[in-house]
Image (tube, rainbow, N blue to C red):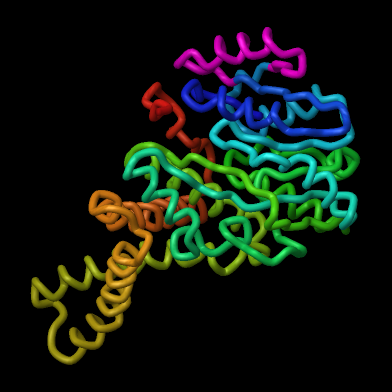
Amino acid sequence: MPVLNERAYLEHAVASVLAQELTVPAELVLALGPSTDGTTELAQSLAAGDPRIRLVDNPAAHIPVGLNAAIRASRFATIVRVDAHSELAPGYAARALQTLERTGAANVGGVMRADGRTPFQTSVARLYNSPVGLGGGAYHGGTHEGEAESAYLGVMRRAVLDEVGLFDESIRRGEDWELNLRIRQAGHLVWFDPHLSVTYWPRESWLRLARQFRATGAWRGELVRRYGRRNGIRYFAPPALVVLVVLALLTGVLQLTGALSGVLSAIVGGLVYLPLVAYLLLVIGVACLPGGGGPRQRLWTLAVLPTMHLSWGLGFLEGVLRGARDTVDASRLGTRNTPLP
């Protein structure tokens, strides 16, 4: 478990891991980044109270660096990746071990079930769970078990990790997708089991969400630079939306200044405005669908969905054009995590 500024979530996340009922020995290795909100002190207290918890340092604060440090420090044949912003469902680990054995897979993952505590966070969670929000990957709500492109978090065979190499420490986001690509290229199986469930708590504010999605998009753009068409077509929808918005703004300026007029103006305007009108109607429709919550949550949906798509798309274009370089997810920095109720 890589950990950075997660004081409000860490204790619940750790409890959900330690509560897993297993018939084999297990440990929980926390890779501690340079937190500023008291997370490190809390982790040390938790470790002092349970010998199953072990601590390693992650001064770089980057997720793949922390994951590799924890894996190297671990002592058992199966690696269960967990997250400080998530909580495992009861029976998760035992079911995952059974699925590994039953399928012969190298990596098994399940469903990421996002949840929220505030109208904003609940709105984000609903869109995480919707194919309109994050593009319909199996782990965002799939129901059919089978071979998968990647796995959320992942329960992995240590021998396969040793064979293909650990997480690529030059990648700051999307490191799980890249690792699973290498696993599949080596001839191993990545498997999705919808009976495995993890509760994920999204970012707690609009700014944090925008920062997270921009960084994630930038690293997906970097992965496109590195691996090209191995990336699914769904990843190109948000940057296409950004391009449409830019073209609509340019078209509007040209129309207002008279540089674009007549039949050509009508044709160009239709090509760029109509898709955006359709997207706007889609956003409104998603906000009005049953299950959208109260008025505040529905209003947040109108802001959150375009924020997710445009931030991700903008980051993607930056990543494709110049590379992700030193882009990091700054949404975990600071001490404004939503407190537990």
x and y percent of residue 50 in the render?
Answer: 71, 13
175, 314: nearer the viewer? 175
4, 13: nearer the viewer? 13
x and y percent of residue 99 in the render?
Answer: 82, 52
Q: Is residue 175 left or right of residue 164?
A: left
Vertical order, 97 against 24 (above or below): below
Quarter of the rendering containing residue 137: bottom right
Q: Residue at x 70, y 29 (%)?
A: 19
State the residue lying farthest toward the left: 257
Q: How many marks?
A: 0
Quadrant of image for the C terminus = top left
Vertical order, 46 against 129 (above or below): above
x and y percent of residue 277 in the render?
Answer: 26, 74
User: Residues in magenta?
Assistant: 33-56
Q: Residue at x 38, y 66 (%)?
A: 241
x and y percent of residue 201 in the render?
Answer: 49, 39
318, 329: nearer the viewer? 329
State the residue lying farthest toward the bottom: 263
Quarter of the rendering containing residue 10: top right
Quarter of the rendering containing residue 212: top left
Q: Is 306 one of the magenta-colored residues?
A: no
320, 113: nearer the viewer? 113
Q: Residue at x 68, y 39 (%)?
A: 90
Q: Is residue 158 left or right of residue 68?
A: right
Quadrant of image for the N terminus = top right
Q: Residue at x 25, y 76 (%)?
A: 273
Vertical order, 271 against 210 (above or below): below
